[in-house]
Image (cartoon, grey):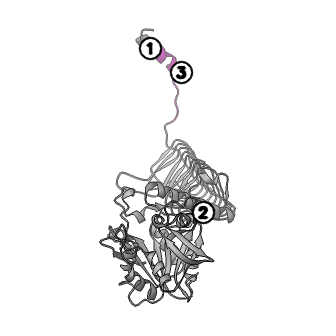
Amino acid sequence: MTTPAPFAAIILAAGMGTRMKSTRHKVLHAIAGKPMLRHLTDSLAMLKPARTVVVVGALKDQVEAEVSGQADVVVQQPQLGTGHAVMQAEAPLAGFDGKILVLYGDAPLVPAATMQRLLDALTDDVAVAVLGFRPADPGAYGRIIAEGGAIAKMVEYKDASPAERAETLCNSGLMAARAADLFPLLARVTNNNASQEYYLPDVVGLALADGRRCVVIETAADEVAGANSRAELADLEAIFQRRRRAELMAAGVSMQAPETVFLAADTRIAADVEIEPFVVFGPGVTIASGARIRAHSHIEGAQIGDGCEIGPFARLRPGTVLGAKAKIGNFVETKKAVLGDGAKANHLTYLGDVTVGAKANIGAGTITCNYDGFFKYQTVIGAGAFIGSNSALVAPVTIGDGAIVAAGSTITRDVSSDALALVRPEQSEKPGWAARFRAASLARKGK
């Protein structure tokens, strides 16, 4: 999507976020593993803004690090209201004469399509376009009195009459206006109110008083929901998860109990993937068609090939790459593990810093001993190799193609292709020893 003409975005993020009880800036708290602010800037990026300015009140360095190369950051100090906050962006946008979209950094789930609708509503005869919504509980939100989309009045709840409070169309705070209108209108906003602050919505009243037309478009309440506390952040997480699960299922992904599946913002799942209950995806996961993710698995930073089967109770950590029809079974953990087509580790195994060839079979209880307390080392397991149960492969070590490692072996040297490696003492037996041991032990206990 692109806009017909260049536009700029102003993101307000000057709130102190004290209810978050955090040293991290409020807008940098994550939803689905991605900071709220980046959710917003990523949606904006789809529309290709000419400029983006983020207005902060504190912790500027944190925000600058997040939006480096994408936006300018300016400080509102002192903080004198939303209108005053937008005015701080006037200098960075000097010379820009197109449309300006005003967003809020703590309301991160506004889709690009809704942003575009708001910009499109700003036609030649419109001074200000406002985004409205109808919450289940309008509460103390400011009300928008409108007919046929044309705004007659915007009023704060505390100043509204009983008839105006009965109106369910509320002001989200998001708006669009041309630079040539927005900043002159803001210059006329006063702080003649109980809080002695300069309020952004007042520009609508000023424009209406000038005989200008202002309009409202409506969107779903979920799209403009914000977070000022940890509890509200959890509410946003729930909104994101519901939305993303629905998108994936509509695209052909099966979820038996979707409400138990948790996705990262960048999780990519192809059609015909089946996801069982209680699966958690961290960032950086891609799953190809036909894979099955079984219950209670945790997957992060992994690429899963066509037709793979994962879990139940599997943990895939970053750097895991699975070829077609590979299998990672119950209580198997992988990290920086590359498995070829058809390779499998079915039970109770740790595979770290390892390359496993096609159709190799890793027995239950096998571990790659990849760390000596200071450095990590690689293990290479060849195609078609068979690693017996309860084996320890002490890296760096290479197991050749088709080799067999006998159960219970501790491998410290390379194993040739098609060879058998057996590292354990020969079994011996002492007849009657167990009976004599029990008798002696009972005598010592006095029984």
Q: CA distance from mark 3 to mark 1?
A: 16 Å
At x 43% / y 60%, what residue is drawn? 228
The local crowd at label 2, few if under 14, some if 14 to 19, many if 20 or more residues have their Cα within 10 Å, is few
In percent of width and height, residue 187 lies at 37, 83
Is 45 displayed left or right of 59 in the figure?
right
- Identity of the amino acid at label 1? Ala
In percent of width and height, residue 132 lies at 55, 71
Q: Nearer the viewer, residue 203 or 227?
A: 203
Question: Is there a contact, CB below 8 Å, between mark 3 and mark 2?
Answer: no
The N terminus, quarter of image: bottom right
Residue 434 in magenta stretch: yes
Residue assigned mark 2:
243
Dot 3 or dot 1, earlier in sequence: 3
Dot 3 or dot 2, earlier in sequence: 2
Q: CA distance from mark 2 to mark 1?
A: 70 Å
- Identity of the amino acid at label 2? Arg
The disc at residue 440 is 1
The disc at residue 431 is 3
Disc 3 is placed on an element classified as loop
In percent of width and height, residue 105 lies at 44, 69
Residue 330 shows in this picture: yes
At x 44% / y 89%, what residue is drawn? 180
Q: CA distance from mark 3 to mark 2?
A: 68 Å
User: Magenta segment range?
Assistant: 426-440
In percent of width and height, residue 231 lies at 47, 54
